[in-house]
Image (tube, rainbow, N blue to C red):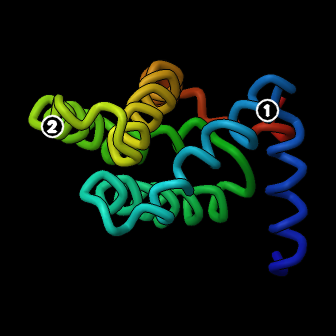
Amino acid sequence: MPTAARLRRSWRSYRSLPGWVQLWVGLVLVPANVLPFFFLDTWSGRAGAAAAVVVVATNLPIMWIAGGMTRAMSLPHLLAWIPLEIALLLRLQGHAGAVGSPEARLALLLLTVNAVSLVFDVLDSWRWWRGEREVAGFDL
């Protein structure tokens, strides 16, 4: 399948997701996980950016091969964000006096957004392991 057709198919798949999922991903999840790239001078920024790179580097091939959004895309989130959540919690615990710092606010944002996402990711991963391998918008 040509590249342009794959891109259109992936976009169609994303747009077939429930509206609230599209809003969550497009307006909350992605922006929160892009934000660390603006804080690379901090430990939390570097850790968040590294996790985001892992997620993108693994999710793009999954989406490309599947031809759209699939529950398999939740698996890399578990591998990247669970360690990130633990590391950020430890970082905040070690720097309790700097709660109002930009780095601490970034860490709290990542902890909150990715914790919510992980709830969905655990469910989607479980469903994928149980055989629900459809591609959103194409497998009904």
Left or right: 1, with 61 as reference point: right
As shown in the figure, which amino acid type bears the numbered disc 1? Leu
Q: Which corner quadrant of the image does residue 10 belong to?
A: bottom right
Q: Label 1's element?
A: helix
Q: Residue at x 80, y 23 (%)?
A: 20
- Please tell me which residue lies in front, 15 or 43: 43
Say few, some or many: other residues with alpha carbon within 10 Å of mark 2 (under 14 / 14 to 19 / 20 or more). Answer: few
Seen as rendered, the residue at the extreme left is 94
Residue, disc 1:
23
- Please tell me which residue lies in front, 1 or 29: 29
From the top left corner, tell me how far across and down residue 132 is, in percent: 59, 27
Left or right: 16, with 24 as reference point: right
Q: Is residue 84 visible?
A: yes
Query: In the displayed structure, would residue 41 be above or below residue 125?
Result: below
The quadrant of the picture occupied by the C terminus is: top right
From the top left corner, tell me how far across and down residue 118 is, in percent: 44, 27
Say few, some or many: other residues with alpha carbon within 10 Å of mark 1 (under 14 / 14 to 19 / 20 or more). Answer: few
Q: Earlier in the sequence, mark 2 or mark 1?
A: 1
Left or right: 38, with 101 as reference point: right
From the top left corner, tell me how far across and down residue 18 is, in percent: 83, 25
Q: Is residue 127 visible?
A: no
Please tell me how many numbered marks the rendered image carries: 2
As shown in the figure, which amino acid type bears the numbered disc 2? His
From the top left corner, tell me how far across and down residue 82 is, in percent: 29, 35
Q: For the residues marked 2 and 1, what is the alpha-carbon distance in whole angstroms?
A: 33 Å
Q: Which corner quadrant of the image does residue 97 belong to?
A: top left
The quadrant of the picture occupied by the N terminus is: bottom right
Q: Label 2's element?
A: loop
Query: In the displayed structure, would residue 26 be above or below residue 63?
Result: above
Residue, disc 2:
95
